[in-house]
Image (cartoon, rainbow, N blue to C red):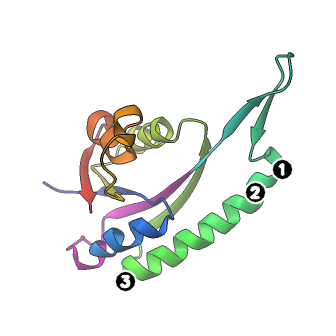
Amino acid sequence: MKVNKIIVAVSLEPETEKPLMKLKDMDIDVNCEIHLVHVVPVILYARGMSLSVLTYPLEEERPSIQEAILAKLSSVKNQILPHHGKVKFKCLFDANEKAAFTDYVANEKADLVIVATRGKHGLTNIFDSSFAQHQLKYSPANVLVLR
């Protein structure tokens, strides 16, 4: 299968660093376009009895958060794909991280999604499935899960 576009979910959590390092050893075509994507969760708050909704992070805080995340994604690129030139960085803000990432994959028409997992198991996943499980179930592209 020819892979032209890969989208990598980057959580920036220390537990996913080691699995992402496996990308160094993968034979990825240098002509393949790679997107390193991080989704910042947006938390919605209802204020009092009124129907006004507040969000966090605030709109005015998002540009500086995005700048910091893009710099971190650049650092990740230098660690895992040091010689690859066709790498793009994307920071998304959404209340539904899983769906936002899946929509991004669909819009970009990716051939492959790569997700590093923390490897959590047990009761917590009964009530809230992991990001990797969500991608395996709903992604419009093939999914590679790194552990």
Q: Is residue 25 magenta?
A: yes
Query: Any mark on residue 83, and which?
Result: 3
Q: Is residue 31 magenta?
A: yes
Precedes in sequence: disc 1 or disc 3: 1
Kindly identify the amino acid type of the residue bearing the numbered disc 3. Answer: His
Q: Is residue 48 left or right of residue 90?
A: right
Residue 93 position, x and y percent, is 62, 45
Q: Which residues are magenta?
A: 23-39
Q: Say above or below: 108 vs 117.
A: above
Q: Residue at x 35, y 43 (%)?
A: 109
Q: Are marks 2 and 1 in contact (CB under 8 Å)?
A: yes
Who is closer to the viewer here, 1 or 80?
A: 80
Residue placed under numbered mark 2 in the picture: 63
Q: Is residue 41 left or right of residue 14?
A: right
Kindly identify the amino acid type of the residue bearing the numbered disc 2. Answer: Pro
Q: Is residue 49 left or right of residue 32?
A: right
Residue placed under numbered mark 1 in the picture: 60
Q: Secondary structure at mark 3?
A: loop
